[in-house]
Image: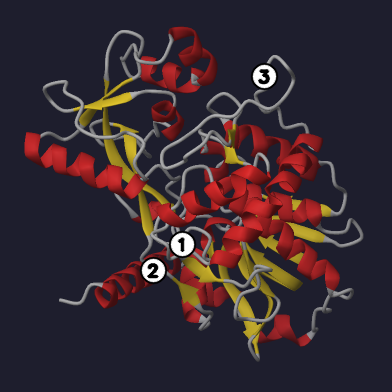
């Protein structure tokens, strides 16, 4: 198979990247699962937007402070300055952000934000955005979507990416030659026992980058979300109780139903406080009280959270719910420049699998969707600016043996071990014994 652009992943960053590329290019998109099983569909809270120039310094400082000032300042500037254009693109795609009666955007606030600057659609903003982008992609005749098609490896020569080896839905392996390749494979939650991520997101692209000596960055920077609904651990993934709930006034209580923390602390600080309280109380969770939010607002802004809690036996209008921290977001990943190009020529990385330094050590709430879209667009612009797409080389397919990856489970198991070991090694370097 040959294609101009190969995009691996169909979350918001991959979809948006495809839509920003010229329709004259043939684009092939693959996804390890079905089209809607990406973490982009799960994002509840919203997407940040610079409201006006008077908000710039505050937004910049909030992002830097949340990231412990380890953020790449230029990346942060690019993200913030690009936000209005991205939001306009999304609106043009039909994304239905909440509006005030006056017709203007309604903004909410989340932890570590000094102002309300987050756009939302109920409590399913990720689904609204990603679903609209997917619908647009499905209408493009130049874009081919392949479900249940997994990345096994990339093909490289002289530090250039020439395509990939993939496992198709029927279990056979195939080489896809491409002019440019974009890694948009998502996070690493599938490596952890408790995570808000889909289980099939296991950092395959990070392992492949390691294998091919593609530079990584901050691979041990892994964010824990402080509030997920506590269960007995049998669920496939942890259900997230959005940061926006606390932004709208929800409170956290200890075992004695006493408030013990400022709920709007940055996520890492709040997580530490919750874990300390759980240890002190010798409990497996703390309580979150949504009754502090007016009932009408609770049902309007957070209908899916209310409904999920009801399915789990909790009436959030009458009782508190048990919550516990869980792995949530990967701030590190494959190192990229400001155009999302990796250290390998013709290979880009966008979304959660990439690290452009925006988030630093800890992500500010609702910056993830924005960052993914901003730098996906920049990747598309960079590829388009090259004017000509490198053509596939006939001998490449003959030089690759797809059957060397015949044992799929063994390949994936090796990749998981590689990523976990690299995280452990990076952590030991950061915190030597």
Tag 2 or tag 1, which sits nearer the N-term? 1
**Distance of label 3 from label 2 (alpha carbons):** 45 Å
Disc 1 to disc 2: CB gap under 8 Å: yes
Q: In the rendered image, which residue does mark 1 sit on?
A: 203
In the displayed structure, 162 sits above or below 427; it is: below
Q: Nearer the viewer, mark 3 or mark 2?
A: 3
| Outermost right residue | 24
Q: Is residue 210 above or below residue 61?
A: below
Location of mark 3 (residue): 100
Quadrant position of residue 420: bottom left
Q: Earlier in the sequence, mark 1 or mark 3?
A: 3
Which one is in front, 346 or 396? Answer: 346
* Residue beneath the point at 88% across and 76% down: 388
Q: Is residue 262 left or right of residue 283?
A: right
| Side of 401 relative to 43 (left or right) | right
In terms of sequence position, does the residue under pointer 3 or pointer 2 come before the other?
3
Please name whichever residue, 335 or 210, is drawn nearer the observer in this view of the structure. Answer: 335
| Mark 1 → mark 2, Cα distance in angstroms | 7 Å
Residue on which the image places disc 2: 419
Q: Is residue 167 or residue 213 the one in the foreground?
A: 213
- Residue located at (51% from left, 34% from top): 45
Quick one: label 2, few (<14), some, or many (20+) residues within 10 Å? many
Location of residue 7 in the rendering, given as x and y in whole percent from the top left corner: 69, 61
């Amino acid at each position: 198979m040959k294609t101009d652009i190969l995009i691996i992943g169909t979350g918001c960053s991959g979809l948006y990247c495809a839509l920003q590329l010229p329709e004259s290019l043939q684009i092939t998109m693959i996804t390890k699962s079905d089209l809607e099983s990406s973490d982009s569909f799960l994002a509840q809270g919203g997407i940040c937007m610079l409201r006006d120039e008077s908000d710039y310094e505050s937004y910049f400082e909030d992002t830097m402070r949340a990231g412990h000032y380890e953020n790449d300042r230029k990346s942060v500037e690019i993200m913030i300055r690009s936000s209005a254009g991205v939001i306009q693109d999304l609106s043009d795609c039909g994304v239905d952000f909440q509006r005030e009666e006056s017709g203007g955007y309604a903004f909410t606030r989340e932890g570590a934000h000094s102002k309300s600057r987050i756009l939302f659609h109920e409590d399913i903003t990720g689904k609204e955005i990603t679903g609209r982008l997917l619908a647009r992609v499905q209408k493009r005749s130049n874009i081919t979507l392949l479900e249940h098609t997994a990345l096994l490896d990339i093909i490289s020569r002289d530090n250039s990416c020439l395509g990939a080896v993939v496992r198709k839905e029927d279990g056979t392996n195939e080489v896809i030659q491409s002019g440019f390749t974009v890694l948009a494979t998502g996070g690493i939650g599938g490596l952890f026992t408790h995570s808000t991520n889909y289980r099939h997101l296991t950092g395959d692209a990070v392992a492949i980058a390691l294998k091919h000596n593609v530079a990584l960055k901050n691979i041990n920077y892994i964010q824990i979300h402080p509030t997920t609904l506590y269960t007995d651990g049998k669920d496939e993934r942890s259900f997230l109780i959005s940061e926006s709930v606390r932004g709208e006034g929800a409170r956290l209580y200890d075992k004695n139903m006493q408030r013990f923390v400022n709920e709007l602390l940055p996520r890492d600080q709040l997580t530490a406080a919750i874990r300390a309280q759980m240890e002190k109380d010798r409990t497996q969770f703390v309580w979150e009280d949504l009754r502090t939010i007016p009932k009408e607002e609770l049902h309007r802004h957070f209908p899916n959270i209310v409904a999920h809690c009801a399915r789990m036996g909790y009436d959030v209008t009458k009782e508190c719910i048990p919550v516990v921290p869980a792995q949530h977001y990967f701030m590190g990943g494959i190192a990229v420049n400001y155009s999302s190009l990796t250290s390998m020529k013709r290979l880009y990385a966008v979304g959660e699998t990439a690290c452009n330094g925006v988030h630093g050590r800890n992500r500010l709430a609702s910056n993830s969707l924005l960052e993914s879209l901003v730098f996906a667009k920049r990747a598309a612009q960079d590829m388009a600016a090259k004017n000509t797409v490198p053509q596939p080389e006939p001998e490449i397919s003959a030089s690759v043996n797809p059957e060397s990856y015949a044992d799929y489970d063994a390949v994936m198991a090796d990749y998981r071990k590689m990523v976990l070991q690299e995280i452990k090694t990076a952590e030991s370097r950061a915190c030597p014994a």
